[in-house]
Amino acid sequence: MITKDRAKEIISRFKDINILVVGDLILDKYLWGDVERISPEAPVPVVDVKKETVNLGGACNVAWNISALNGNVHIAGVIGRDENGRVLEFLLKEKNVNPILIKDPSRPTTEKTRIIAVSQQLMRIDREDKSKISLEILEELIDRIDSVIEDVDAIIVSDYGKGVITKELMDYLRSMEKPIFVDPKPSNVDLYHRVTIMTPNKKEAYELARLDRDNPIERVGKFLMEKLQMEQLLITLGAEGMALFTEDNIVKIPAKARKVYDVTGAGDTVISVLALSKAAGGTWEESASLANYAAGYVVGEIGTAVVSQEKLIELIP
Ligand SMILES: Nc1ncnc2c1ncn2[C@@H]1O[C@H](COP(=O)(O)OP(=O)(O)OP(=O)(O)O)[C@@H](O)[C@H]1O
Ligand SMILES: [Mg+2]
């Protein structure tokens, strides 16, 4: 699909690429502990917390994937006027991501906390407000994006359905006439027409198309492209790799078989590498192939991981 020399050529241009990530910002928190007894208050385990860690989640993880590959990246989204918002800003800057963070005092910064004991997730606790952002916040967001958009080579929309991605914002982004890469939320399907490419997983593809599982994936993809007037579509197929749809062709790219530790974040890696490679002059097939190598690597690492340029080159035979 792609030779090592060609991959090196494309990857060496990442440093000159500017990507704008727009979407739902999430702070991932982890409470690590031990369970030694059942609570006297209710039939639930008592977790003795030994360690607390935080990580970039949602659209922030996409931006981190890009900076880890030496791409230049801005991230635009909404946070609350709270401590988690400050933590998110600190983490983004630490990872060389340029933050455009609009503070909305009416909502909390989206937070997902996992409680993990004996290597097992016991519970997840979410704090979020999924309502659509107000007109005032939208205008502030567009104003700030407008000041950086000129130098942007590609836009990634990372929609986790938390209210930032709206029809008005998508209309604005389309009017900038830059390539738009979308990691979609199926319930927002009506927002994505005429984008450059979308990267749903298999389940999301069926949901977006509102077709049932009897339909082969080829039909689902073609139907989606027609419905949304897209010229490209990349459906990720988990352990089976991905299917790249272009105007006149469907190419299946098999996944590299490897030990899987943690599939979370694989989709974020796919869209990051796809956008960087395409902006760096790769063909759709070359870009999807690189994205497939990168995602295959991150699923083999514990915790949400990112890939470096050196590692990505090393992965290609
Ligand atoms: N078991 C696996 N073995 C090898 N590669 C995998 C495996 N699972 C996922 N991948 C790689 O990751 C890519 C994306 O996986 P998947 O289709 O599960 O996306 P996703 O559901 O959007 O992930 P996410 O949980 O990040 O949203 C695949 O196209 C493939 O390259
Ligand atoms: Mg996904």
Image (cartoon, grey):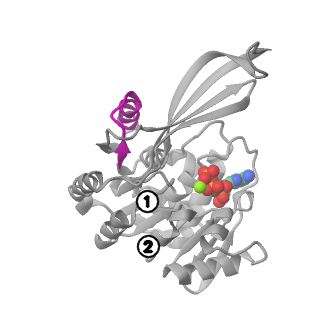
**Please, is residue 158 above or below residue 310 in the view?**
below
Give the prevailing secondary structure in the magenta stretch: helix
Quadrant of the rendered image holding ligand 1: bottom right
Respond yes or no on whether mark 2 lies under 8 Å from ligand 2. Answer: no
Q: Which residues are magenta?
A: 77-92
Query: Which residue corresponds to mark 1?
Result: 157
Question: Considering the image in quadrants, where does the N terminus appear?
Answer: bottom right
In the image, 5: left or right of 176?
A: right
- Identify residue type, mark 2: Val
Percent x, y for residue 232?
52, 76
In the image, 12: left or right of 135?
A: right
Query: Which residue corresponds to mark 2?
Result: 195
> Callout 1: helix, strand or loop?
strand
Residue 52 seen by the camera: yes
Image mark count = 2
Kindly identify the residue that appears in the image at 24 percent across and 56 percent down.
139
